[in-house]
């Protein structure tokens, strides 16, 4: 009996998990909601690095590791590729295509937090859509700036930052209202490639608001790479894994 270990992290991973039978395992880091209506097994939590993941693969007799983690979860993807190699099994990956700038976009790529903060000095009302990372820097907000930070859950802000807890998909009219109400003059975003969060880029384009885009990390080479759920499921079916 062939067994798949599916590492989740993007919306598409759940769509794949819904097709898996009880011999397979859907693995989540524990951030966000944990589905309870799947036929496959669900595992929540970390593994203790590449060696821990490799041991889990051996213990569970996994035949295929499928990495469907977030494009910016570089360490997890590296651990997955290493663990698969240590066990002599294939590692496949579902990797969303990156967004591409369109006519009217003003995108400015930054490599890290230090470069981002430098680029941010030109603006006063930024909207952060990077997840929780900016929470570590709330005491660094300059007096001339007010930050709006959107994350999956609500966290404490301060008198220079308001944190909005919200989960996609986001509607374009709601994004327009947010930009207008907060008078956003710059958007900070990862290039996640997700359709659920793309409307913010459309609104930035409409309003002529620059976008500081955090550069995607380099991800390890894997045996096979896919761009969509349909493509991934077709390959799994053809290989006899599901």
Image (spheres, rainbow, N blue to C red):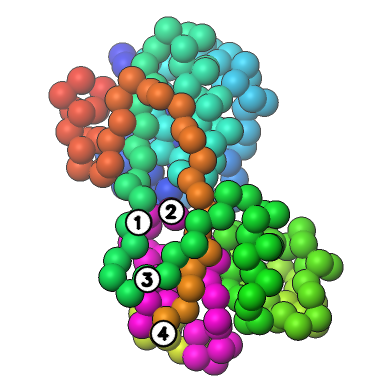
Q: Secondary structure at mark 2?
A: loop
Q: Position of residue 69 (x, y in %)?
A: 46, 40
N-terminal label among 3 and 4: 3
Q: Position of residue 44 (x, y in %)?
A: 57, 39
Q: Which residue is mark 4?
A: 207
Quarter placement of the C terminus: top left
Q: CA distance from mark 4 to mark 1?
A: 19 Å
Picture residue at 47% right of the left edge, 33% below the top: 219
Q: Callout 1: 10 Å neighbours few (<14), some, many (20+)?
A: some
Q: Secondary structure at mark 4?
A: helix
**Contact, mark 3 vs mark 1 (Cβ under 8 Å):** no
**Contact, mark 2 vs mark 1 (Cβ under 8 Å):** yes
Closer mark to the observer between disc 3 and disc 1? 3
Is-magenta flag for residue 125?
no
Q: CA distance from mark 2 to mark 4?
A: 21 Å
In this picture, which residue range is highlighted in magenta? 179-206
N-terminal label among 2 and 4: 2
Mark drawn on residue 99: 1
Residue 13 appearing in the image: yes
- Of 40 and 183, which appears nearest the observer? 183
| 184 relative position to 242: left or right | right
Q: CA distance from mark 2 to mark 1?
A: 7 Å
Is-magenta flag for residue 181?
yes
| 87 relative position to 118: left or right | left
Q: CA distance from mark 3 to mark 4?
A: 10 Å
């Amino acid at each position: 009996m062939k067994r798949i270990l599916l590492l989740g992290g993007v919306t598409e991973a759940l769509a794949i998990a819904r097709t898996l039978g009880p011999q397979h395992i859907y693995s989540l880091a524990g951030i966000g909601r944990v589905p309870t209506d799947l036929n496959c097994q669900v595992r929540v939590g970390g593994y203790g690095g590449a060696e821990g993941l490799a041991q889990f693969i051996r213990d569970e007799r996994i035949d295929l590791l499928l990495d469907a983690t977030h494009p910016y979860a570089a360490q997890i993807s590296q651990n997955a590729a290493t663990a698969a190699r240590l066990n002599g099994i294939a590692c496949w990956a579902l990797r969303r295509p990156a967004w591409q700038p369109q006519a009217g976009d003003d995108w400015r790529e930054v490599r890290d937090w230090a470069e981002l903060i430098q680029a941010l000095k030109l603006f006063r009302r930024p909207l952060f859509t990077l997840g929780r990372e900016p929470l570590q820097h709330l005491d660094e907000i300059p007096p001339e700036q007010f930050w709006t930070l959107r994350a999956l859950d609500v966290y404490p802000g301060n008198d220079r930052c308001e944190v909005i807890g919200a989960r996609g998909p986001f509607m374009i009219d709601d994004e327009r209202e947010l930009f207008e109400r907060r008078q956003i003059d710059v958007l900070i975003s990862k290039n996640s490639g997700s359709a659920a969060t793309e409307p913010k880029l459309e609104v930035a384009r409409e309003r002529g608001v620059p976008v500081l885009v955090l550069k995607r990390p380099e991800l390890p080479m894997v045996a096979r790479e896919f761009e969509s759920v349909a493509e991934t499921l077709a390959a799994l079916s053809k290989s006899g894994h599901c």
